[in-house]
Amino acid sequence: MKHILLYFFLFLFTSMTVTAQVGIGGPENVGLMDQDPEQANIKVFPNPATNFIGLSNYKGIAQIAIYNVVGRKLRTFTVIDDRKYSIADLPNGMYLVQLVNHNNKIIKTHRMSKR
């Protein structure tokens, strides 16, 4: 009886894990289904960052917001062509970089570490 219950819970756990991984195509695709392909290729670099960050493709991006992992907004930058954005005064750690378009719609959120 113990073996049957063990197999049942193992089957249940593995089926839930597979469903969660396949459900939306993985975490990197969240929110990208209805996006312009050009905006889907936007990258925040370098990662890990030290003193500054930049965007690999800034077309359509109006603003960059940097949040700590608790969700507190630490910085907001207005996007200007080929500009680098200083993060030298932020402590080392993990941050979320949110890219916002001209209609205040979030286009993409990147995870970034600072060293």
Image (cartoon, rainbow, N blue to C red):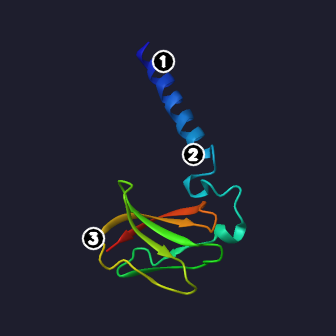
111 shown above or below 115 = above
Q: Assign the N terminus to one quadrant of the image.
A: top left
Task: Determine whether the residue tagged by mark 1 lies in a helix, strand or loop.
Answer: helix
Report the disc number at residue 21.
Answer: 2
Query: Which residue is under mark 3?
Result: 91
Q: Amino acid at mark 1?
A: Ile
Q: Residue at x 65, y 77 (%)?
A: 59
Residue 68 percent coordinates (x, y): 36, 61
The x, y position of residue 110, in whole percent, is 50, 64
Q: Which of pointers 1 and 3 lies earlier in the amino acid sequence?
A: 1
Q: Residue at x 27, y 70 (%)?
A: 91
Q: Is disc 2 placed on a helix, strand or loop?
A: helix
* Disc ID at residue 16: none
Check disc 3 and report its element: helix, strand or loop: loop
Name the one closer to the observer, 54 or 1.
54
Residue type beneath disc 3: Pro
The quadrant holding residue 82 is bottom right
Q: Nearer the viewer, mark 2 or mark 3?
A: 3
Q: Which residue is mark 1?
A: 4
Disc 1 vs disc 3: which is toward the camera? 3
